[in-house]
Image (tube, rainbow, N blue to C red):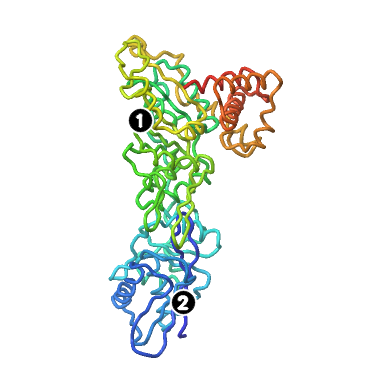
Amino acid sequence: MSLAITHCRAELGIDAPSVRVEVHVAGGLPGLTIVGLPATAVREAKDRVRAALQNSGFTIPPRRITINLAPADLPKDGGRFDLAMAIGILAASDQLRAELDGIELIGELSLSGELRPVASLLPSVVASRRSGRALVVPAADAEQALIAEHPRLRLADHLLAVCAGLQDPAAWPSLPACPPTPGPAPLRDLREVRGHGQARRALEVAASGRHNLLLLGPPGSGKSLLAQTLPSLCPELSETEALELASIQSASRGGFSAAHWRQVPFRNPHHSASAAAMAGGGGLPRPGEISLAHCGVLFLDELPEFRREVLEVLREPMETGLVRIARVRQRIDYPARFQLIAAMNPCPCGYLGDPSGRCHCSSDLVRRYRGRVSGPLLDRIDLQLVVPRLSPAELLEPAGDAIEDSARVRRRVEVARARQLERSGCLNAALSPEQLDAVCALDPAGRNLLRQAGERMQLSGRGLHRVMKVARTIADLEGSHAVAVPHLAEAVQFRQA
């Protein structure tokens, strides 16, 4: 035949749209042309494919070869199309006779014909599993590909192995065993925290409803330690969450690790990070810190030291759970349902209100310092807590049996989350106003308390809703069907900062 069609997948964030690779061999001057909006790496594929075919014992037809990557308006980048183009040339020139319609081919070819690993492979494996087609990928990517549990996955390490498998399905090598479920990562345990009873309680509430948390206190008060213990309180990711996070990490080029793919992520970017590093970007947009913290914790230490435009990037994802990166020819959406934990000092020197009296910051200086964090961003943080500095006696007091460890608290968090998911299908932090009204019906005493708190603290409508969500989580921790006055009172106390 002079026309052959194979199938591959492009890279578009955590999506992997199908690409139809059409290879036409016709008369005319010998040459190989690739059309269909190819990037530089794709245009260079003609040299890789030609050398791989020749070094594998095949011949390049001395005719005009045209390769079309459809749809033509979808950008194509990387070496992932090499294998599909090579098999298409062999089929169009009658050097390979095989059924190609029900199989997808992804892999970069070396000049010797060996298959090299492909960047951002996991989204393609997930998309191919949904399509029902078989999928051939490089054997070097086995660890990543096996995670998606594709029922018709095929692994190959050379172009010749792919040709043999296409002609005789029994020639495909057997798949290795799936990687074992990793054990828990070494996390900071809540038992390491001395004192700070209210902060420990705030962490439990934050973990139960996936609420955002701000810790305000002087240097050395334990804010960073408290934040680092939060992942140990969170239940293990579900399979759907873990696979979505793994796809984001795979798209980040180098951020994926099969040893930790089921664990709650903890991202701690430096305050010098740019807005693009936080939200993602680039010519071919990659996920940023916000998306890499998906279903986990994004910890921003020294919050006022981040540039204003960097912090403002957080506002929309905190509401929508999504990061949208727009380019001229494409728009990429990355999931970003993260939990923000922020820490900051009360003033530039950090010792405002400290009993030692060593703070000499003027009120104007303190106001400018705190003004670096915008009101709209603070309004989106559910729990805002003052963390005082402990005395040496409190710090040196040995841990007793009364101090709970993370495992014990995590069991309560799991029960509270199960109640929320059964009732609303989501955690309390993600409740819509309509859902909140349905699950948080207040009695007259509760409405009066919330009204007084709103007037005294000058809470916005969003702030009132956040207090109600926290109160709903506190009620869930206690196993209460209704939100009572004590739950609301505690939720109001958690906005004291």
Residue 283 position in % (x across, y down) = 37, 58
Q: Quadrant of residue 189?
A: top left
Residue 356 visible in image: yes
Label 1 sits on residue? 302
Residue 419 position in % (x across, y down) = 62, 31
Residue 496 position in % (x across, y down) = 49, 20
Considering depth in this image, is 353 or 336 the residue closer to the camera? Answer: 353
Instruction: Give the residue at x 31% y 11%.
Output: 356
Examine the rendered structure and indicate whether residue 353 appears above or below residue 46: above
Q: Quadrant of residue 182?
A: top left
Specify whether 360 is left or right of 1: left
Instruction: Give the residue at x 39% y 20%.
Output: 193
Specify whether 123 is left or right of 346: right
Within 10 Å of the Cα at label 2, are there few (<14), some (14-19), or many (20+) other Cα atoms? many
Q: Amino acid under label 1? A: Glu
Examine the rendered structure and indicate whether residue 241 appears above or below residue 328: above
Q: Amino acid under label 2? A: Glu
Considering depth in this image, is 17 or 387 the residue closer to the camera? Answer: 387
Disc 1 to disc 2, C-alpha distance: 54 Å
* Element assignment for label 2: strand
* Element assignment for label 1: loop
Total numbered circles: 2
Label 2 sits on residue? 22
Counting residues from the N terminus, which is met first, the one under dot 1 or under dot 2? 2
State the residue lying farthest toward the front.
364
Q: Nearer the viewer, mark 1 or mark 2?
A: 1
Residue 108 position in % (x across, y down) = 35, 65
Residue 169 visible in image: no
